[in-house]
Amino acid sequence: MGDGNYDRTLREFCIPDYILVPGSEVRSVSHVPACPVIVFINTKSGGQLGGELLVSYSTLLNRNQVFELGKNAPDKVLQKLYATLETLKHNGDNFAAEIQNRLRIIVAGGDGTASWLLGVVSDLKLPQPPPIATVPLGTGNNLPFAFGWGKKNPTTDLQSVETFLNHVKAAKEMKIDSWHIIMRMKAPKEGSCDPIAPLELPHAMHTFNRVSSTDKLNLKGYHTYRGGFWNYFSMGMDAQVSYAFHSERKLHPEKFKNQLYNQSAYLKLGCTQGWFFGSLFQSSLRNIAQLAKVKIMKKGQWEDLHIPRSIKSIVCLNLPSFSGGLNPWGTPNRKKSIYRDLTLPYVDDGLFEVVGFRDAWHGLVLLAPKGHGTRLAQVGHVGFVIIPVVFFFS
């Protein structure tokens, strides 16, 4: 592990075994690490660099604080860790209390992996939720980019990993809005829709489950489901292409071995599914206005949102980053009356931005310095009514 200075640097991140491995001998520790970390690595993420990172982090840190997500469920890992910390604290272990106070999580993966960890930490309702730093291993990496961690897949050598650890130690904590999705489907008069196999959603979509019959969200005559998201939620052509990419990668993971290939595969799917040339490939493509009625809440009242007939995709953005670092919302000119009530997008303002696109050619305007999509609304609640399904976001 190098010379003495190198060892002293890494001491600031290491956690001793007696905290990580239940039943280990409790030892007295004199030095409290400034930034103890738990590391989760998805070796199957877009860039396929996770295996190399796993080796580097395991070499630099205590290997018991580094976890491969394919083999270790993050909720189980954190439940066990926090149970141990609470027990040790109850027994008067001040070192364990400091570890809990200073703990940070590093997650190496794409947007889906990062959202997965955010969901786990949120669902566990930990007494002191640890902040999460993200290593951009995916294809788009919008979440890491929005928080300053970059969007390109990183190098995986020991020096690069040590540099990233020091960035984590110096980083300031930021909040991120968590958005809830409620989906209601009219219950059939006869039979049940329960036997229908559920869609295997990407991890970027927070766990999507049917609520219990006693839940206050339940409405008579409807099946109600609840989920959530952190990045963005899209409906229409963009969502169709994204789901096709997810499905293709799941069927043929061996093909998706680097970020550049993944991005080109996404572009190819966009062409074949009509996102660029709708009239040539799918003459029956419909716009959002034909698919759904869209409602937004203003001052406690639901009102219809006008959607131009040309719009074929709607994106509800929680981040100022989309499709690999582009900003569909842009910077509204508040001197113009139509933008007077709009602000810059922030990850913690309790609002999300609703943006529309006509097609992929429209999306290319985001590459221009002041390019943006069609700004439709900036709100905290939106509803999509698709007969017989109703979505509500808040």
Image (cartoon, helix red, strand yellow):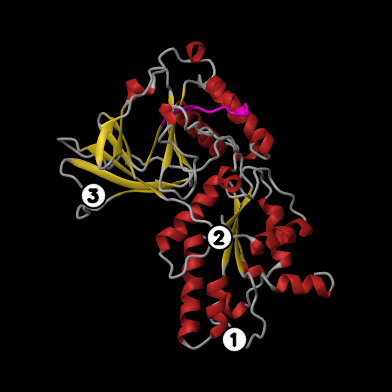
Report how far apart the C-alphas of labels 1 and 2 lie in the structure.
33 Å
At a point 63% along the width and 69% down the height, the residue shown is: 35
Q: Magenta stretch containing residue 371, yes or no? A: yes
Q: Helix or strand or loop: what does disc 3 sit on?
A: loop
Q: Give percent across and percent down for residue 134.
A: 60, 53
**Which residue is disc 1 drawn over?**
25
* Mark 1 residue crowding within 10 angstroms, few (<14) / some (14–19) / many (20+): few
Q: Give percent across and percent down for residue 359.
A: 50, 21
Q: Helix or strand or loop: what does disc 1 sit on?
A: loop
Is the C-beta separation of discs 1 and 3 under 8 Å? no
Report how far apart the C-alphas of labels 1 and 3 lie in the structure.
48 Å
- First in sequence: mark 1 or mark 2? 1
Amino acid type of the residue tagged 2 in the rendering: Glu
Amino acid type of the residue tagged 1 in the rendering: Glu
**Which residue is disc 3 drawn over?**
217
- Say which mark, if any, is on residue 173: 2
Q: Is residue 143 above or below residue 174?
A: above
Front-lying residue, 313 or 50 = 313
